[in-house]
Image (spheres, rainbow, N blue to C red):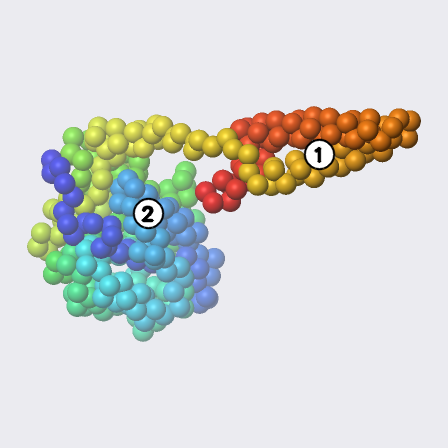
Amino acid sequence: MTNADRDPVGDPALSHAVLIGTATYRHPSYSDRNLPGVSANVAKLGLTLRQDVPWGLEPARCVAVMDPTSADEILTAIETAGTQCRGTLFVYYAGHGFCSSTSPDELYLTHSGSAEDRQATALEYRHLRDTLIHCGAPNKILVLDCCYAGNATRVMGSLNGHLAIEGTFVLAATGPNRAARADSATGLTAFTNELVGVLGKDGVPGAGPFVSIEEIAVRTHERLEASNLPLPTRQAHGYAGRRPIFKNYADPTIIAGMLDSLTEPEPEPATRDAQVTLPHLAWGLLWSLVVGVACAAIVRSGHSEVWALRAGVAAGVLAGAAFFATGAWLALTGRGPAAAGHQGTS
């Protein structure tokens, strides 16, 4: 895609992201099978989406829901963001997932209170789908990185083949009845590790300054395939997958803009007006008076009052001149009361 401008629905000022991760489970059926990589997934993806490249979402528009305790908590977070969203709604889920024992096409997403293979304790995918359909956001992206029972390598679960949602692009970490592995080198799951890499670090070479989620998905697929890892699946309904939304890190114009922002010259410091202020004048007069009186007292002790007066006046004038000269220097160099006044109002 070579679009020079971002699609309006991709405007980060109008868009929202909801990142859901279930890393910790309370039920004995998931004993010793928590998913620390899921916490890393949510944290890294959130940081990536908030950066100017690729998206620049404000923190308030990028909500993380870690270890939800019920299906309702997940759906409520999506509904809340969806009713406020006037651009693109990006929903991400990572955690254990399982399919119905009676209907292999039914996908269930777990929360921290779920029990393995117990449908009543998890979020049925069709309820998530219905929430997205009715949320009101004009453009929707759903990313699923689901896992179910795992061994030491955190085996990831299968996804069903019925994921289509009106106006939504769905990107799933695996194909039907396929497993996906965690990436032990980064702490993220293999799928999310590559997705984040394409979004915020490597981009899509030759795709222009802005890329669609479809292009992101294709590039993620290529990277997983090159590493001989389980391949993701994707499904688009409508134009959702083809809208240029994300800044492309691999595009030269995007890189040039980033470099320009790093090398912008610092503004020149504000110039200070050299001036002798009222405090200088008051202190100068006081200092002159003190020195004059002191000198007159000293001279008077051994000479006539006329000489004492002359000495006092001369000493006072010299002291005042010295003080005013010092005050002017302090104001000029930014160390005196004039400089303090400037700093207080800057």
Residue beneath the point at 40% across and 68% down: 69
Residue for badge 1: 288
Residue 99's quadrant in the figure? Answer: bottom left
Tell me the SS state at disc 1. Answer: helix
Rendered location of residue 285, percent (x, y): 67, 37
Residue beneath the point at 44% across and 51% down: 36
Left/right of residue 225 with respect to residue 165 in the rendered view: right
Residue for badge 2: 50
Q: Nearer the viewer, residue 212 or 159?
A: 212
From this viewpoint, is residue 326 visible? no
What's under tag 1, amino acid-wise? Ser
Q: Nearer the viewer, residue 312 or 333?
A: 312
What's under tag 2, amino acid-wise? Arg
From this viewpoint, is residue 47 visible? yes
Rendered location of residue 125, percent (x, y): 23, 65
N-terminal-most mark, 2 or 1: 2
Cα distance between the residues tagged 2 and 1: 63 Å
